[in-house]
Image (spheres, rainbow, N blue to C red):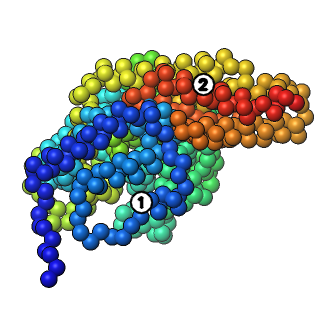
């Protein structure tokens, strides 16, 4: 007769011993993190062969699981929490956030209605107010924690759609007779989440109007005005404008005052994607020149990008009180409670019903570092980025592309021999030089990342193919960034050598 598997969970003393092994693994991970490759060189098939296996029929010793994680999983990650991870937008899990995540998993509450998680819901109210104060938004606005900025933008545009006068999408849908054609506007630098949102909303990509950006990659408010006016004259309805503070490619910030004036003139909802740029407003030098997020109808900011909080946690705000709830509130009998006055049911603000206790991570991180500590750490990232820009600007074969107040540096290899040739060249030759420079930079990025000491990503902008260096990890030092810059220079000299030898 087969042996009956044990029932129940570990005893608490067994849990404590196993937890100690995991904490030791985490400590070892960070102690040796600079000695790790930032990304793996293994091929997909080989990795599948390494990790695959039959479904376990019986439990295995936890020590074996931990050791196989150490030996087989950790070496084959791309280490986003590495001090020399500079791709995409740097994210960074602080130790306070890591420990908070552990406790969140332990209590495993569902913060859907106030009664289901009273302290979790109340802490969400508290940290949402704190963060609104940090980024310069109305502290009395409706706010909710969601898992990412892409969903935050989608939820905001849902509310914007339902706020259009004269339509009732909630009851009659977008296909009801007489429903006007809705238009959404975003710059040519906006994040792809806007495209996904209009698809999911049923507005359609044909009704996403792309607004050209200026020489600094900011939305042109004059072009927005012209496009909106043309649509209004054609009987179309301007539903929303999505502006960006901290664009993905270059870290540009759209001129919110000018964009907001266009929105007010035409009754369009202004949503601001400040997923990256919002928290840098904590740095006084940036806040002095930053766009005012407070003029937006809704805004999204990302603590898991800039506030040293583990994935996934994003803040969505709406200054139009009740708009999110008007879109998403639906309370079946089994979710009705008698929580009393002042209780917020956060399920009313999004599609999500099952919601983790995200607020605890923010509460711990903000209290651990304090506002001053967060400012100091963010300011250091800005300072390091400035040092990198100065180093690039001082090199005859490299240049910075685009301007950003944030610690995102876009650079490219542009050998002086080719640069000298551009002036006075024919249109055909200019195109050939651009293609050659683009290929040089693509090779530079590939070889740099293949070395594994650091990791960067790229963008293609008007000037061409650029290497993006994002700085923001809590453990990143100037030495980390300058080591990466030294490698970029060294590899750049190698890939450009045939040009210099002509």
Asked if marks 1 and 2 touch (Cβ < 8 Å), the reply is no
396 sits left or right of 175 in the view: right
Residue name at image x 66 percent, y 27 percent: 490
Taking the image as shown, residue 479 lies to the left or right of residue 27, namely right
SS at mark 1 in the image: helix
Can residue 94 be seen here? yes
Q: Which residue matches tag 2?
A: 486
> The residue tagged with tag 2: helix, strand or loop?
helix
The residue where tag 1 is placed is 51
- Of mark 1 and mark 2, the one earlier in the sequence is 1
Q: Position of residue 114 (x, y in %)?
A: 16, 50
- Measured as percent of width and height from the top left, residue 299 is found at 40, 40
Left or right position of 269 against 122: right
Q: Where is residue 450? Give x, y as percent.
A: 59, 42
Q: Quadrant of the N terminus?
A: bottom left
| Pointer 2 local density, CA inside 10 Å: few below 14, some 14–19, many at least 20 | few
- 171 above or below 278? below
Q: Residue at x 39, y 62 (%)?
A: 168
Task: Identify whether 334 is placed above or below 489.
Answer: below
Q: Is residue 228 above or below residue 86?
A: below
Furthest-bottom residue in view? 1
Front disc: 1 or 2? 1
């Amino acid at each position: 007769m087969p042996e009956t598997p044990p029932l129940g969970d570990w005893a608490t003393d067994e849990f404590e011993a196993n937890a100690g092994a995991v904490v030791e693994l985490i400590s070892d991970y960070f102690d040796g993190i600079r000695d790790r490759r930032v990304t793996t060189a293994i091929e997909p098939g080989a990795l599948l062969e390494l990790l695959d296996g039959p479904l376990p029929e019986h439990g295995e010793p936890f020590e074996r699981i931990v050791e196989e994680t150490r030996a087989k999983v950790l070496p084959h990650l791309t280490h986003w929490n590495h001090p020399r991870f500079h791709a995409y937008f740097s994210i960074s899990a602080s130790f306070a956030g890591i420990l908070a995540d552990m406790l969140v998993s332990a209590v495993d509450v569902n913060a859907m209605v106030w009664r289901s998680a009273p302290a979790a819901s109340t802490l969400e109210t508290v940290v949402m107010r704190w963060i609104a104060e940090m980024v310069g938004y109305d502290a009395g606005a409706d706010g909710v924690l969601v898992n990412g900025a892409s969903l935050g933008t989608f939820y905001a545009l849902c509310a914007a759609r339902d706020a259009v006068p004269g339509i009732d999408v909630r009851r009659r849908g977008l296909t009801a007779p007489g429903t006007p054609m809705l238009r959404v506007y975003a710059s040519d630098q906006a994040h792809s989440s806007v495209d996904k949102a209009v698809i999911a909303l049923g507005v359609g990509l044909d009704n996403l109007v792309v607004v050209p950006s200026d020489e600094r990659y900011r939305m042109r408010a004059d072009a927005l005005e012209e496009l909106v006016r043309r649509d209004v004259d054609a009987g179309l309805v301007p539903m929303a404008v999505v502006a960006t503070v901290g664009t993905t490619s270059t870290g540009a910030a759209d001129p919110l005052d000018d964009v907001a004036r266009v929105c007010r003139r035409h009754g369009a909802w202004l949503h601001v994607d400040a997923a990256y740029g919002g928290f840098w407003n904590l740095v006084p030098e940036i806040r002095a020149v930053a766009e005012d997020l407070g003029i937006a109808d809704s805004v999204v900011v990302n603590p898991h990008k800039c506030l040293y909080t583990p994935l996934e946690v994003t803040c969505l705000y709406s200054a139009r009180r009740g708009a999110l709830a008007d879109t998403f509130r639906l309370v079946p009998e089994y979710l009705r409670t008698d929580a009393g006055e002042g209780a917020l049911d956060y399920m009313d603000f999004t599609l999500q019903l099952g919601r983790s206790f995200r607020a605890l991570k923010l509460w711990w991180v903000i209290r651990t570092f304090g506002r001053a500590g967060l400012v100091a750490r963010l300011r250091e990232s800005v300072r390091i980025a400035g040092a990198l820009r100065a180093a690039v600007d001082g090199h005859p074969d490299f240049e910075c592309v685009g301007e950003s107040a944030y610690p995102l540096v876009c650079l490219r290899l542009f050998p002086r021999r080719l640069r000298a040739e551009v002036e006075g060249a024919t249109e055909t030759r200019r195109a050939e030089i651009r293609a050659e420079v683009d290929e040089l930079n693509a090779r530079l990025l590939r070889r740099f990342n293949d070395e594994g000491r650091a990791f960067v990503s790229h963008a293609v902008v008007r000037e061409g193919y650029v290497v993006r260096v994002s700085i923001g990890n809590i453990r990143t030092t100037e030495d980390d960034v300058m080591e990466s810059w030294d490698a970029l220079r060294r590899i750049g000299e190698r890939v450009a050598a045939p040009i210099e030898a002509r």
